[in-house]
Every structure is written in C-alpha cells, then in structure tokens.
Amino acid sequence: MNITQHAASRSSPPRRSDPHRWWARAFGGMFLAGAATHIVLVATRPSSYGSFADGSWWPFIAHAWRSVLLPNIHFLIPLLVIYEAAVGLLILSRAYRRIGIATAIAFNAALILFGWGFCVWSAPVIVLLLRFWYLESAFGHTNGEKPAGHVPDPLCGASLGDIRPAGPALGDGIAPSLGTSAEPAARSTSAACDIGEADRTMRPGRDKAG
C-alpha cells in the first residue's frame, strides 16, 4: 500500500456496527408477522374479529368495535396491516428505528384497552420496547460526537492543531512524486531538523569567535 492509499483509508470513516440488530429483528419481525396474520384472517375468517373487544373494560369500546369496525372490516383491517408493516420496517431500519419503537409502544398501549388478556401480553412487550429505546438512545449519543484529529507538522513533527485538513498531508505527496519510499523521506526530514537545531546551538560560539 502506497502513501496515497494509506491516507485515503485513514481518512475514510469506519462503518458503524449495529449492536442491537437482534432486538430490531425480533420486534420488527413480530410486527411484520402480525401484518401477515391479519391478511390471512381478513381474507379467510373475517368473523374471527367479532369477539375481539368483548373483554374490554369499558362497554363503549366494545360498542364502537361492533358498530364501526365490523361493518367496515375489509377497509379498516388493511389499514391496520399497513400500519403494522410500516412499524416493523421502521424498527428494522437504522435511521428511523426509534420512530418505529415509539409507534410500537403506542400500539401496545392501545391494546391494553381491550382487556386483561391483551394487558398480560402488552405490558411486558412495552417494558422490553422501553429497554430497546434506551439502548438505541445511549448508542446514538455515544457515537454522535466525532473526536478531532491531531495533525503533525510535515517537517519536524510539531503539532499543527486539532483540525485535520481536507487534503492529504504535505509529506504524503512528496515520496510518490520522487519515486522513493516514505521511510527515506522521513529519515532525511528528521536529519534536516537535527542539522538545523545543531546550527542554532553552535551559532553563539561562532559569533564570539568572530
């Protein structure tokens, strides 16, 4: 690898890993599987939705279910399918994962309104989703700040500051243009610095002798 390729590989940002991919696959797959289940049920057994809200704690929820959803089941259930599929895809993505987690929490919180059976399922799921949200937030906060680079002086190794220039360093383009390797160029540069330092040290003695 020559100096130019090394500088290019050093300047390219590393790929961010996904430490929570199994969380995303579990919850994203769960919502995608729920969407597929609704497709099968609404196509083969739409009557199975008739008793869905019978265990609700509030009678008006069961009444609204029977009077609004059941007559329009072939229109409203496909909307539910689209919603669950979108939540699953958002969770599986990287850029919009926390939006998917938030909508998944809201969906499971709404299921609690339909009675104890859904509460037993939704309460642990909400706890796990909150944990997932915390892990994603902590990971994004940790990786949000980029450490500043430290650029050495191309001649004598002194620091030029904490901001790395956009182009390659001055020493990176010298060796390839002369057809030599980087190691002899570095040795000659160090020797030039040593000679200059020795000359400055001996200059007062020469001045007195003169």
Image: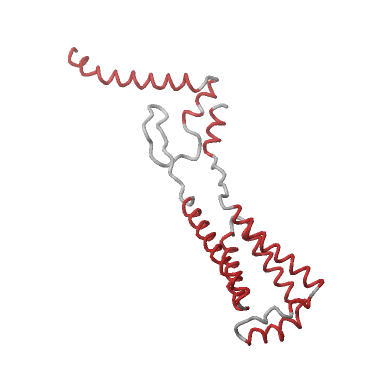
Above-or-below relation of 99 to 74: above
How many discs appear? Answer: 0
Above-or-below relation of 53 to 30: below
Residue 33: percent from left, percent from top: 71, 62
- Residue placed most toward the observer, 171 or 5: 5
Residue sticking out furthest to the right: 44
Q: Quadrant of the N terminus?
A: top right
Residue 58: percent from left, percent from top: 60, 85
Q: Is residue 139 left or right of residue 26?
A: left
Q: Quadrant of the C terminus?
A: top left
- Residue placed most toward the observer, 69 or 155: 69
Q: Is residue 172 left or right of residue 196?
A: right
Query: Picture quarter containing residue 5?
Result: top right
Above-or-below relation of 135 to 70: above
Residue sticking out furthest to the left: 208
For the point 53% across and 65% down, which residue is it?
Answer: 127
Residue 177: percent from left, percent from top: 54, 24
For the point 71% across and 69% down, which residue is it?
Answer: 81
Query: Picture quarter containing residue 176?
Result: top right
For the point 49% across and 50% down, which residue is it?
Answer: 143
